Image: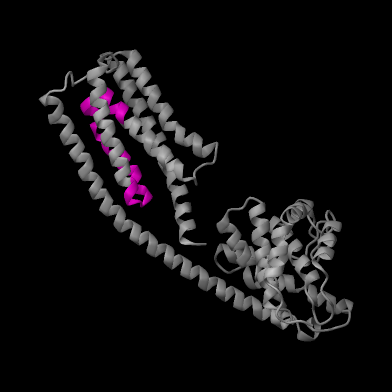
Amino acid sequence: MDKKYMRSRNTADINRVSARCLRVVVYFLALFYAYLLILKEYNMWILSVSFGACVILAFIPGVLIGIFKQEGHGYTQHVIIWCTVLVSMILITELNYTGYPFILFPLLLSSLYYNRTFVLYASLLMNAGILASAVIQIEIPDIVLNPIFYEYDNRFAEMIIPLILIETTMAFVAFFIVDRNSLMIDKYIDTAETMRENENYLIYAFSEISENKSKETGEHIRRVAEYMKVLGLASGFDREYCEKLAAGAMMHDIGKLMIPEEILDKPSKLTEEEYQIMKSHVLYGEALLKDCPGEIMQIAATLAKEHHERWDGKGYLGMKGQQISYIARMISVCDVFDALTSARSYKKGWSVDEAYEEIIKNSGKQFDPNVVRLFVSNFDKIREIHERIPDKTLY
Protein backbone atom coordinates (compact mmCIF):
# COMPACT_ATOMS: atom_id res chain seq x y z
CA MET A 1 0.00 0.00 0.00
CA ASP A 2 1.94 3.04 -1.23
CA LYS A 3 1.44 6.79 -0.86
CA LYS A 4 -0.07 7.12 -4.33
CA TYR A 5 -2.71 4.52 -3.50
CA MET A 6 -3.51 6.11 -0.15
CA ARG A 7 -3.95 9.48 -1.85
CA SER A 8 -6.22 7.96 -4.51
CA ARG A 9 -8.41 6.46 -1.78
CA ASN A 10 -8.50 9.84 -0.06
CA THR A 11 -9.55 11.48 -3.34
CA ALA A 12 -12.35 8.93 -3.79
CA ASP A 13 -13.67 9.70 -0.30
CA ILE A 14 -13.50 13.46 -0.95
CA ASN A 15 -15.33 13.03 -4.26
CA ARG A 16 -18.20 11.37 -2.40
CA VAL A 17 -18.25 14.14 0.22
CA SER A 18 -18.18 16.85 -2.46
CA ALA A 19 -21.05 15.25 -4.36
CA ARG A 20 -23.10 15.19 -1.15
CA CYS A 21 -22.27 18.86 -0.52
CA LEU A 22 -23.66 19.77 -3.92
CA ARG A 23 -26.85 17.87 -3.19
CA VAL A 24 -27.23 19.63 0.17
CA VAL A 25 -26.85 23.00 -1.56
CA VAL A 26 -29.72 22.05 -3.87
CA TYR A 27 -31.99 21.44 -0.88
CA PHE A 28 -31.31 24.92 0.46
CA LEU A 29 -31.74 26.42 -2.99
CA ALA A 30 -35.12 24.73 -3.26
CA LEU A 31 -36.27 26.58 -0.15
CA PHE A 32 -34.86 29.87 -1.41
CA TYR A 33 -36.41 29.55 -4.86
CA ALA A 34 -39.74 28.60 -3.28
CA TYR A 35 -39.54 31.81 -1.26
CA LEU A 36 -38.92 33.83 -4.44
CA LEU A 37 -41.88 32.18 -6.12
CA ILE A 38 -44.11 33.06 -3.18
CA LEU A 39 -43.06 36.72 -3.48
CA LYS A 40 -44.26 36.70 -7.12
CA GLU A 41 -41.83 39.53 -7.91
CA TYR A 42 -39.78 37.57 -10.42
CA ASN A 43 -40.42 35.78 -13.69
CA MET A 44 -41.56 32.28 -12.74
CA TRP A 45 -40.31 30.75 -16.00
CA ILE A 46 -36.77 32.11 -15.54
CA LEU A 47 -36.77 31.01 -11.88
CA SER A 48 -37.84 27.50 -12.82
CA VAL A 49 -35.29 27.13 -15.62
CA SER A 50 -32.37 28.44 -13.54
CA PHE A 51 -33.28 26.24 -10.57
CA GLY A 52 -33.71 23.21 -12.87
CA ALA A 53 -30.27 23.83 -14.37
CA CYS A 54 -28.75 24.01 -10.87
CA VAL A 55 -30.43 20.74 -9.90
CA ILE A 56 -29.17 18.92 -13.00
CA LEU A 57 -25.62 20.19 -12.54
CA ALA A 58 -25.61 19.40 -8.81
CA PHE A 59 -26.74 15.81 -9.36
CA ILE A 60 -24.32 14.97 -12.20
CA PRO A 61 -21.47 14.11 -9.76
CA GLY A 62 -23.86 12.02 -7.69
CA VAL A 63 -24.89 10.02 -10.76
CA LEU A 64 -21.26 9.63 -11.82
CA ILE A 65 -20.31 8.30 -8.38
CA GLY A 66 -23.46 6.51 -7.25
CA ILE A 67 -24.43 4.78 -10.50
CA PHE A 68 -21.27 4.61 -12.60
CA LYS A 69 -18.93 4.13 -9.60
CA GLN A 70 -16.37 6.63 -10.87
CA GLU A 71 -15.42 8.14 -7.50
CA GLY A 72 -11.83 6.93 -7.76
CA HIS A 73 -11.06 8.38 -11.18
CA GLY A 74 -9.13 11.61 -11.52
CA TYR A 75 -11.58 13.24 -13.91
CA THR A 76 -14.40 12.96 -11.38
CA GLN A 77 -13.02 15.79 -9.24
CA HIS A 78 -12.82 17.97 -12.36
CA VAL A 79 -16.46 17.21 -13.15
CA ILE A 80 -17.38 18.16 -9.58
CA ILE A 81 -15.55 21.50 -9.75
CA TRP A 82 -16.95 22.34 -13.18
CA CYS A 83 -20.49 21.61 -11.96
CA THR A 84 -19.87 23.68 -8.82
CA VAL A 85 -18.56 26.63 -10.85
CA LEU A 86 -21.53 26.48 -13.25
CA VAL A 87 -24.03 26.35 -10.36
CA SER A 88 -22.30 29.33 -8.74
CA MET A 89 -22.29 31.21 -12.05
CA ILE A 90 -26.03 30.66 -12.51
CA LEU A 91 -26.70 31.89 -8.99
CA ILE A 92 -24.65 35.09 -9.27
CA THR A 93 -26.19 35.73 -12.70
CA GLU A 94 -29.78 35.34 -11.55
CA LEU A 95 -29.57 36.48 -7.91
CA ASN A 96 -26.89 39.19 -8.25
CA TYR A 97 -25.82 40.47 -4.82
CA THR A 98 -27.61 37.65 -3.02
CA GLY A 99 -25.65 35.07 -4.98
CA TYR A 100 -22.18 36.60 -4.62
CA PRO A 101 -21.18 34.52 -1.56
CA PHE A 102 -21.33 31.51 -3.87
CA ILE A 103 -18.15 32.65 -5.65
CA LEU A 104 -16.26 31.05 -2.74
CA PHE A 105 -18.09 27.72 -3.01
CA PRO A 106 -15.73 26.16 -5.63
CA LEU A 107 -12.75 27.16 -3.48
CA LEU A 108 -14.23 25.44 -0.45
CA LEU A 109 -14.69 22.17 -2.32
CA SER A 110 -11.34 22.30 -4.13
CA SER A 111 -9.50 22.87 -0.84
CA LEU A 112 -10.75 19.48 0.38
CA TYR A 113 -8.47 17.69 -2.10
CA TYR A 114 -5.16 18.74 -0.50
CA ASN A 115 -3.95 19.78 -3.96
CA ARG A 116 -2.56 23.31 -4.26
CA THR A 117 -2.72 23.37 -8.06
CA PHE A 118 -6.35 22.25 -7.98
CA VAL A 119 -7.24 25.21 -5.74
CA LEU A 120 -5.76 27.68 -8.22
CA TYR A 121 -7.47 25.81 -11.07
CA ALA A 122 -10.87 26.16 -9.34
CA SER A 123 -10.18 29.85 -8.69
CA LEU A 124 -9.36 30.45 -12.36
CA LEU A 125 -12.58 28.73 -13.43
CA MET A 126 -14.63 30.78 -10.96
CA ASN A 127 -13.04 34.05 -12.11
CA ALA A 128 -13.99 33.13 -15.66
CA GLY A 129 -17.50 32.38 -14.36
CA ILE A 130 -17.74 35.80 -12.69
CA LEU A 131 -16.77 37.53 -15.91
CA ALA A 132 -19.09 35.35 -17.99
CA SER A 133 -21.98 36.11 -15.62
CA ALA A 134 -21.53 39.87 -16.10
CA VAL A 135 -21.27 39.50 -19.87
CA ILE A 136 -24.48 37.41 -19.97
CA GLN A 137 -26.32 40.14 -18.04
CA ILE A 138 -25.28 42.69 -20.65
CA GLU A 139 -25.63 40.59 -23.79
CA ILE A 140 -28.72 38.50 -22.90
CA PRO A 141 -30.64 40.52 -20.29
CA ASP A 142 -33.94 38.75 -21.05
CA ILE A 143 -32.83 35.56 -19.28
CA VAL A 144 -31.71 37.40 -16.13
CA LEU A 145 -34.14 38.09 -13.28
CA ASN A 146 -32.77 41.50 -12.33
CA PRO A 147 -29.63 42.48 -14.26
CA ILE A 148 -27.30 45.02 -12.67
CA PHE A 149 -25.03 45.46 -15.69
CA TYR A 150 -26.36 47.08 -18.86
CA GLU A 151 -23.16 48.05 -20.63
CA TYR A 152 -19.39 47.82 -20.34
CA ASP A 153 -18.82 50.98 -18.32
CA ASN A 154 -17.14 52.09 -15.10
CA ARG A 155 -19.80 50.33 -13.01
CA PHE A 156 -18.92 47.07 -14.74
CA ALA A 157 -15.23 47.45 -13.88
CA GLU A 158 -15.88 48.74 -10.36
CA MET A 159 -17.86 45.61 -9.45
CA ILE A 160 -16.21 42.82 -11.44
CA ILE A 161 -12.58 43.66 -10.69
CA PRO A 162 -13.07 43.65 -6.88
CA LEU A 163 -14.96 40.32 -7.11
CA ILE A 164 -12.14 38.77 -9.10
CA LEU A 165 -9.54 40.18 -6.67
CA ILE A 166 -11.46 38.78 -3.69
CA GLU A 167 -11.70 35.37 -5.36
CA THR A 168 -8.00 35.38 -6.26
CA THR A 169 -6.92 36.53 -2.78
CA MET A 170 -8.96 33.81 -1.11
CA ALA A 171 -7.50 31.29 -3.56
CA PHE A 172 -3.97 32.13 -2.41
CA VAL A 173 -5.05 31.92 1.22
CA ALA A 174 -6.56 28.50 0.51
CA PHE A 175 -3.38 27.59 -1.41
CA PHE A 176 -1.19 28.00 1.68
CA ILE A 177 -3.72 26.29 3.95
CA VAL A 178 -3.89 23.33 1.57
CA ASP A 179 -0.08 23.27 1.33
CA ARG A 180 0.18 22.94 5.10
CA ASN A 181 -2.56 20.32 5.28
CA SER A 182 -0.97 18.39 2.42
CA LEU A 183 2.28 18.10 4.37
CA MET A 184 0.35 16.85 7.39
CA ILE A 185 -1.47 14.26 5.27
CA ASP A 186 1.84 13.05 3.83
CA LYS A 187 3.25 12.64 7.34
CA TYR A 188 0.14 10.73 8.37
CA ILE A 189 0.43 8.43 5.34
CA ASP A 190 4.14 7.83 6.02
CA THR A 191 3.39 7.03 9.67
CA ALA A 192 0.54 4.70 8.73
CA GLU A 193 2.73 2.93 6.16
CA THR A 194 5.52 2.47 8.71
CA MET A 195 3.07 1.06 11.26
CA ARG A 196 1.61 -1.28 8.64
CA GLU A 197 5.05 -2.52 7.65
CA ASN A 198 5.96 -3.11 11.30
CA GLU A 199 2.69 -4.92 11.91
CA ASN A 200 3.22 -7.16 8.88
CA TYR A 201 6.78 -7.88 9.96
CA LEU A 202 5.60 -8.96 13.42
CA ILE A 203 2.77 -11.02 11.91
CA TYR A 204 5.19 -12.74 9.55
CA ALA A 205 7.73 -13.41 12.32
CA PHE A 206 5.02 -14.79 14.62
CA SER A 207 3.60 -16.94 11.81
CA GLU A 208 7.00 -18.30 10.80
CA ILE A 209 7.49 -19.61 14.34
CA SER A 210 4.37 -21.76 13.98
CA GLU A 211 5.41 -22.96 10.51
CA ASN A 212 8.95 -23.81 11.63
CA LYS A 213 7.59 -25.77 14.55
CA SER A 214 5.87 -28.05 12.06
CA LYS A 215 9.03 -28.16 9.90
CA GLU A 216 7.48 -26.06 7.16
CA THR A 217 9.00 -22.90 5.70
CA GLY A 218 8.22 -19.22 5.71
CA GLU A 219 7.87 -19.35 1.93
CA HIS A 220 4.61 -21.28 2.41
CA ILE A 221 3.31 -18.32 4.42
CA ARG A 222 4.36 -15.83 1.76
CA ARG A 223 2.87 -17.81 -1.10
CA VAL A 224 -0.48 -18.37 0.59
CA ALA A 225 -0.64 -14.67 1.43
CA GLU A 226 0.07 -13.74 -2.21
CA TYR A 227 -2.49 -16.27 -3.49
CA MET A 228 -5.07 -14.68 -1.19
CA LYS A 229 -4.36 -11.25 -2.69
CA VAL A 230 -4.97 -12.64 -6.18
CA LEU A 231 -8.27 -14.32 -5.26
CA GLY A 232 -9.32 -11.34 -3.14
CA LEU A 233 -8.89 -8.88 -6.02
CA ALA A 234 -10.61 -11.33 -8.39
CA SER A 235 -13.51 -11.49 -5.91
CA GLY A 236 -13.97 -7.72 -6.10
CA PHE A 237 -12.42 -6.72 -2.78
CA ASP A 238 -10.53 -3.43 -2.78
CA ARG A 239 -6.76 -3.36 -2.60
CA GLU A 240 -6.61 -2.32 1.06
CA TYR A 241 -8.81 -5.21 2.18
CA CYS A 242 -6.73 -7.64 0.10
CA GLU A 243 -3.62 -6.45 1.93
CA LYS A 244 -5.40 -7.23 5.19
CA LEU A 245 -6.46 -10.64 3.86
CA ALA A 246 -2.84 -11.44 3.01
CA ALA A 247 -1.65 -10.38 6.47
CA GLY A 248 -4.39 -12.38 8.18
CA ALA A 249 -3.66 -15.42 6.01
CA MET A 250 -0.11 -15.56 7.37
CA MET A 251 -1.53 -16.60 10.74
CA HIS A 252 -3.94 -19.30 9.61
CA ASP A 253 -1.85 -22.07 11.21
CA ILE A 254 -0.90 -20.17 14.37
CA GLY A 255 -2.76 -22.76 16.45
CA LYS A 256 0.00 -25.31 15.68
CA LEU A 257 2.01 -23.62 18.40
CA MET A 258 -0.21 -25.47 20.87
CA ILE A 259 0.22 -28.91 19.27
CA PRO A 260 2.94 -31.23 20.65
CA GLU A 261 5.95 -31.61 18.36
CA GLU A 262 5.81 -35.39 18.43
CA ILE A 263 2.45 -35.15 16.64
CA LEU A 264 3.48 -32.39 14.23
CA ASP A 265 6.72 -34.19 13.28
CA LYS A 266 5.40 -37.74 13.19
CA PRO A 267 6.43 -39.21 9.80
CA SER A 268 3.87 -42.00 9.88
CA LYS A 269 0.09 -41.85 9.87
CA LEU A 270 -1.48 -40.30 12.96
CA THR A 271 -3.65 -42.40 15.26
CA GLU A 272 -7.26 -41.34 15.68
CA GLU A 273 -6.43 -39.76 19.04
CA GLU A 274 -3.44 -37.91 17.57
CA TYR A 275 -5.54 -36.78 14.63
CA GLN A 276 -8.13 -35.28 16.99
CA ILE A 277 -5.36 -33.38 18.78
CA MET A 278 -4.01 -32.14 15.45
CA LYS A 279 -7.49 -30.96 14.40
CA SER A 280 -7.73 -28.87 17.56
CA HIS A 281 -5.14 -26.42 16.18
CA VAL A 282 -7.96 -24.56 14.39
CA LEU A 283 -9.70 -23.85 17.69
CA TYR A 284 -6.44 -22.93 19.39
CA GLY A 285 -5.75 -20.50 16.58
CA GLU A 286 -9.14 -18.86 16.94
CA ALA A 287 -8.72 -18.63 20.71
CA LEU A 288 -5.33 -16.95 20.35
CA LEU A 289 -6.59 -14.34 17.90
CA LYS A 290 -10.29 -13.65 18.44
CA ASP A 291 -9.84 -11.14 21.27
CA CYS A 292 -7.06 -9.20 19.52
CA PRO A 293 -8.18 -5.73 18.33
CA GLY A 294 -8.10 -4.71 14.69
CA GLU A 295 -9.60 -5.96 11.44
CA ILE A 296 -6.53 -7.96 10.46
CA MET A 297 -6.66 -9.98 13.65
CA GLN A 298 -10.37 -10.68 13.22
CA ILE A 299 -9.70 -11.85 9.66
CA ALA A 300 -6.87 -14.01 10.99
CA ALA A 301 -9.12 -15.50 13.68
CA THR A 302 -11.71 -16.48 11.07
CA LEU A 303 -9.09 -18.03 8.78
CA ALA A 304 -7.42 -19.86 11.67
CA LYS A 305 -10.72 -21.43 12.68
CA GLU A 306 -12.20 -22.29 9.29
CA HIS A 307 -9.30 -22.97 6.90
CA HIS A 308 -9.79 -26.76 7.14
CA GLU A 309 -13.53 -26.65 6.47
CA ARG A 310 -14.89 -28.30 3.33
CA TRP A 311 -17.67 -27.24 0.99
CA ASP A 312 -19.34 -30.66 1.46
CA GLY A 313 -19.28 -30.41 5.27
CA LYS A 314 -16.59 -33.05 5.86
CA GLY A 315 -14.03 -30.64 7.33
CA TYR A 316 -12.64 -30.39 10.84
CA LEU A 317 -15.64 -28.60 12.38
CA GLY A 318 -18.38 -29.87 10.07
CA MET A 319 -19.26 -26.46 8.62
CA LYS A 320 -20.81 -26.67 5.16
CA GLY A 321 -21.27 -24.46 2.11
CA GLN A 322 -22.30 -20.91 2.92
CA GLN A 323 -21.80 -21.58 6.63
CA ILE A 324 -18.09 -21.23 5.95
CA SER A 325 -16.98 -17.64 5.60
CA TYR A 326 -16.03 -16.68 2.05
CA ILE A 327 -12.47 -15.75 2.95
CA ALA A 328 -12.02 -19.18 4.59
CA ARG A 329 -13.26 -20.82 1.38
CA MET A 330 -10.59 -18.80 -0.44
CA ILE A 331 -7.74 -19.82 1.85
CA SER A 332 -8.81 -23.45 1.69
CA VAL A 333 -7.96 -23.48 -2.02
CA CYS A 334 -4.76 -21.48 -1.51
CA ASP A 335 -3.51 -23.59 1.40
CA VAL A 336 -4.24 -26.96 -0.21
CA PHE A 337 -2.70 -25.96 -3.54
CA ASP A 338 0.49 -24.81 -1.85
CA ALA A 339 0.61 -27.83 0.46
CA LEU A 340 0.31 -30.17 -2.54
CA THR A 341 3.12 -28.47 -4.46
CA SER A 342 5.46 -28.21 -1.45
CA ALA A 343 8.01 -30.89 -0.54
CA ARG A 344 7.98 -31.98 3.08
CA SER A 345 10.01 -34.46 5.14
CA TYR A 346 7.27 -37.06 4.68
CA LYS A 347 6.39 -36.43 0.98
CA LYS A 348 7.51 -35.09 -2.36
CA GLY A 349 5.83 -32.03 -3.79
CA TRP A 350 3.37 -32.43 -6.63
CA SER A 351 3.86 -30.61 -9.91
CA VAL A 352 1.93 -27.37 -10.35
CA ASP A 353 -0.22 -28.96 -13.06
CA GLU A 354 -1.05 -31.99 -10.91
CA ALA A 355 -2.10 -29.74 -8.02
CA TYR A 356 -4.14 -27.61 -10.44
CA GLU A 357 -6.07 -30.69 -11.62
CA GLU A 358 -6.62 -31.82 -8.03
CA ILE A 359 -8.19 -28.46 -7.11
CA ILE A 360 -10.53 -28.67 -10.11
CA LYS A 361 -11.42 -32.29 -9.35
CA ASN A 362 -12.54 -31.31 -5.83
CA SER A 363 -14.66 -28.36 -6.90
CA GLY A 364 -18.06 -28.72 -5.26
CA LYS A 365 -16.67 -31.29 -2.84
CA GLN A 366 -13.79 -29.88 -0.83
CA PHE A 367 -13.87 -26.41 -2.40
CA ASP A 368 -16.41 -23.71 -3.21
CA PRO A 369 -17.02 -23.93 -7.00
CA ASN A 370 -17.03 -20.13 -7.31
CA VAL A 371 -13.61 -19.86 -5.68
CA VAL A 372 -12.29 -22.64 -7.92
CA ARG A 373 -13.50 -20.72 -10.98
CA LEU A 374 -11.57 -17.66 -9.81
CA PHE A 375 -8.54 -19.87 -9.13
CA VAL A 376 -8.71 -21.25 -12.69
CA SER A 377 -9.21 -17.86 -14.35
CA ASN A 378 -6.27 -16.39 -12.41
CA PHE A 379 -4.01 -19.43 -12.54
CA ASP A 380 -1.28 -17.65 -14.52
CA LYS A 381 -0.83 -15.28 -11.56
CA ILE A 382 -0.88 -18.22 -9.11
CA ARG A 383 1.78 -20.03 -11.12
CA GLU A 384 3.95 -16.89 -11.29
CA ILE A 385 3.83 -16.53 -7.49
CA HIS A 386 4.71 -20.21 -7.02
CA GLU A 387 7.77 -19.82 -9.27
CA ARG A 388 8.80 -16.48 -7.80
CA ILE A 389 8.77 -17.67 -4.15
CA PRO A 390 10.33 -21.16 -4.07
CA ASP A 391 11.03 -23.10 -0.88
CA LYS A 392 14.51 -22.60 0.50
CA THR A 393 14.59 -25.97 2.24
CA LEU A 394 14.45 -29.03 0.03
CA TYR A 395 13.81 -32.49 1.35
- Can you say whether 256 is above or below 156 in the image? below
Residue at screen point 79% across, 70% down: 341
Q: On the picture, is 290 further left or further right than 317?
A: left
Whether residue 16 is visible here, answered yes or no, is: no
Residue at screen point 40% across, 22% down: 52
- Can you say whether 373 is above or below 52 in the image? below
Total numbered labels placed on residues in the image: 0
Residue at screen point 65% across, 65% down: 226
- Foreground residue, 75 or 17? 75
Residue 59: x %, y % from top left: 45, 32
Q: On the picture, is 297 further left or further right than 314?
A: left
Q: On the picture, is 138 further left or further right than 195?
A: left
Q: Quadrant of residue 188?
A: bottom left
Residue 194: x %, y % from top left: 47, 70
Residue 96 within the segment the image draws in magenta: yes
- Foreground residue, 135 or 8? 135
Residue 358: x %, y % from top left: 85, 62
Residue 248 within the segment the image draws in magenta: no
Q: Quadrant of residue 141?
A: top left
**Magenta-drawn segment:** 89-118
**Furthest-bottom residue in view?**
262
Residue 2: x %, y % from top left: 49, 62
Q: Quadrant of the C terminus?
A: bottom right
